Amino acid sequence: MGKYLAPALDKGLDIIEYLSMKAIPQSQMEISQGLEKSPNEIYRMLVCLEQRGYLIKDATSGKYSLSLKLYHLSHRHSPVDELVKTSKPFMEKLSSETKQSCHMGILYHGKLMVVSQMRSPGPVSLSIEEGSFFSLIKTTSGKVILAFMNEDRQKQILSEDKEYNELSKEEKSDLLLRLQKIKERGYELGKSEITIGVTDIAVPVGDIQSGIFSTLAISSLTSISSKNESGEYLISKITESVTSINIALGF
């Protein structure tokens, strides 16, 4: 049986898979070089994918990036959907017991994308819109995702991350050391670099090798640390929730 039974389809999938690995939009030349094909060879496929809504072409730079069409098409049957559906009751329980908001995030196109959230039952509650995108290196959940990647994948993601490339050599070294420590202890706790007065705790969910992988995070308006009573309690409760989610997912 030949390797290429549908050359055009194979070429289109190559483009989609290549762009899914890139944190920033890519030009036609960059895509062709990445796929080791000539620019002319992929031109018609790029036009087709753009017209069908799978790719977005920047009007100024002419560079291509993936749209969310694949995510929307596969939502009911995707690992992400299974993850969200399975975790929902455990997130509700976590939020109810801790009186804190929680949310679940995944890696998407070099960013942290929030796919599910649960507001706290209290009168004052943090809310993060589902579908929102955030920096990997400036969020607690993003750091956890990076920490549990294999080394090659982590290097690739960081090499294409604009914010990471703007860091000094010392700052990059500090970040990599922090990621190593996160992996060793199994969670991250830190003050939000995005929202003043918020402390986040994030724990990995699922198995990165299976494709079902995310983070569950608590966002607290209370100043906490891993050494005080509230910190110990929240770490215990979110770890308990993640264990329950993993069991329900079959891990």
Image: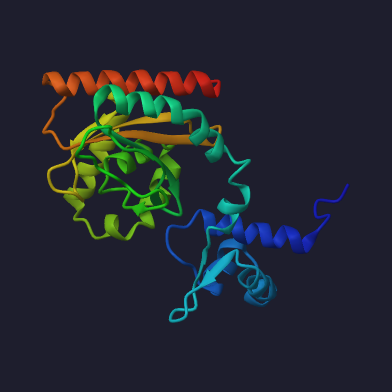
Where is residue 67? Give x, y as percent: 53, 62
Looking at this view, name the residue that lies furthest to the right: 1
Instruction: Compare residues 131 and 12 and report the one nearer the observer.
Output: 131
Write the residue at 37% across / 55% down.
159
Write the residue at 18% across / 49% down.
195
Write the residue at 32% across / 40% down.
141
Q: On screen, 129 above or below 121?
A: below
Q: Is residue 186 visible?
A: no
Instruction: Compare residues 211 and 221 and report the one nearer the observer.
Output: 221
Where is residue 210? Give x, y as percent: 56, 32
Where is residue 120? Give x, y as percent: 28, 34
Write the residue at 49% across / 68% down.
26
144 with respect to 156 (left or right):
left
Q: Is residue 142 visible?
A: yes
Which colour style is shown? rainbow
Where is residue 115? Give x, y as percent: 44, 44
* Tally of numbered tags: 0
Looking at this view, name the residue that lies furthest to the bottom: 60
188 with respect to 103 (left or right):
left
| Occupied quadrant, residue 38 | bottom right
| Occupied quadrant, residue 24 | bottom left
153 with respect to 124 (left or right):
right
